[in-house]
């Protein structure tokens, strides 16, 4: 499992861009993890980076010196299936369905009510219940 915390990737992204940015951001801190002696964390991040690159159809060996044939072969490899859970309490995200208006058989949409804490995070006032109680409690 890999979670990207809120406010770390703000803007318009494709799914590929989201995964690529996550990979680049994790990779950029790898040398610092080793310098701080966080060897276990370094290896955990390395596994996540490797998985992200696999999802992107990249490999560890591909660099700027790679030939066009090597790049073409990498791009034709099958990307393994994976699950993306996009939890967006503000509702600002959009995932394009290639065959719209037909439903996408590979996508599940779950609508839910925001918790009082999520309401506060997105800038909404707390519910009447939360106001009456005087606290924000997501267990209500």
Image (tube, rainbow, N blue to C red):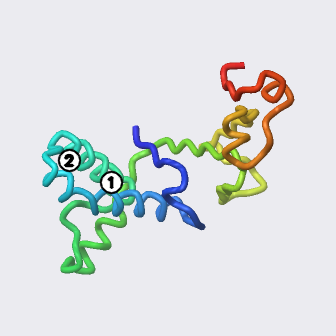
In this view of the protein, can residue 87 be seen by the observer? Answer: yes
- Dividing the picture into quadrants, the one containing residue 136 is top right
- Picture coordinates of residue 65, whole percent (x, y): 18, 80
Is 64 or 67 nearer to us in this picture? 64
Q: Under tag 2, what secondary structure?
A: helix
In this view of the protein, can residue 97 be seen by the observer? Answer: no
- Picture coordinates of residue 66, whole percent (x, y): 21, 77
Q: Under tag 1, what secondary structure?
A: helix
Q: Earlier in the sequence, mark 1 or mark 2?
A: 2
Where residue 1 is drawn, which disc sits there? none
Residue under label 2, please give it: 42
Against 92, residue 117 (above or below) is above
Q: Tell me the quarter of the image containing the C terminus.
A: top right
- Picture coordinates of residue 69, whole percent (x, y): 25, 76
- Please report the residue visible at 73 percent of the width from the left and 35 percent of the height from the top: 114
Q: Is residue 43 left or right of residue 10?
A: left
- Picture coordinates of residue 135, whole percent (x, y): 71, 26
Q: For marks 1 and 2, give the one nearer the viewer.
A: 2
- Please report the residue visible at 32 percent of the width from the left and 73 percent of the height from the top: 72
- Please report the residue visible at 55 percent of the width from the left and 65 percent of the height from the top: 13
Contact, mark 1 vs mark 2 (Cβ under 8 Å): no
Residue under label 1, please give it: 54
Q: Tell me the quarter of the image containing the N terminus.
A: top left
Against 18, residue 128 (above or below) is above
Give the alpha-carbon distance from disc 1 to disc 2, as whole Å: 18 Å
Is 17 or 91 nearer to us in this picture? 91
Q: Residue furthest front?
A: 134
Crowding near the residue tagged with mark 2, few <14, some 14–19, many ≥20 C-alpha atoms within 10 Å: many
Q: Residue furthest top?
A: 140
Crowding near the residue tagged with mark 1, few <14, some 14–19, many ≥20 C-alpha atoms within 10 Å: some
- Please report the residue visible at 40 percent of the width from the left and 62 percent of the height from the top: 20
Q: Is residue 82 left or right of residue 69?
A: right
């Amino acid at each position: 499992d890999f979670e990207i915390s809120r406010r770390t990737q703000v803007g318009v992204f494709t799914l590929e861009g989201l995964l690529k940015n996550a990979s680049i951001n994790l990779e950029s801190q790898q040398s610092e993890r080793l310098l701080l002696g966080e060897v276990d964390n370094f290896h955990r991040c390395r596994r996540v980076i490797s998985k992200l690159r696999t999802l992107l159809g990249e490999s560890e060996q591909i660099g700027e010196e790679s030939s066009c044939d090597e790049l073409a072969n990498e791009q034709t490899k099958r990307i393994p299936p994976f699950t993306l859970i996009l939890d967006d309490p503000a509702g600002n995200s959009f995932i394009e369905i290639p065959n719209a208006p037909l439903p996408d058989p590979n996508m599940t949409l779950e609508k839910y009510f925001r918790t009082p804490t999520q309401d506060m995070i997105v800038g909404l006032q707390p519910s009447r219940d939360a106001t009456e109680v005087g606290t924000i409690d997501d267990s209500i």
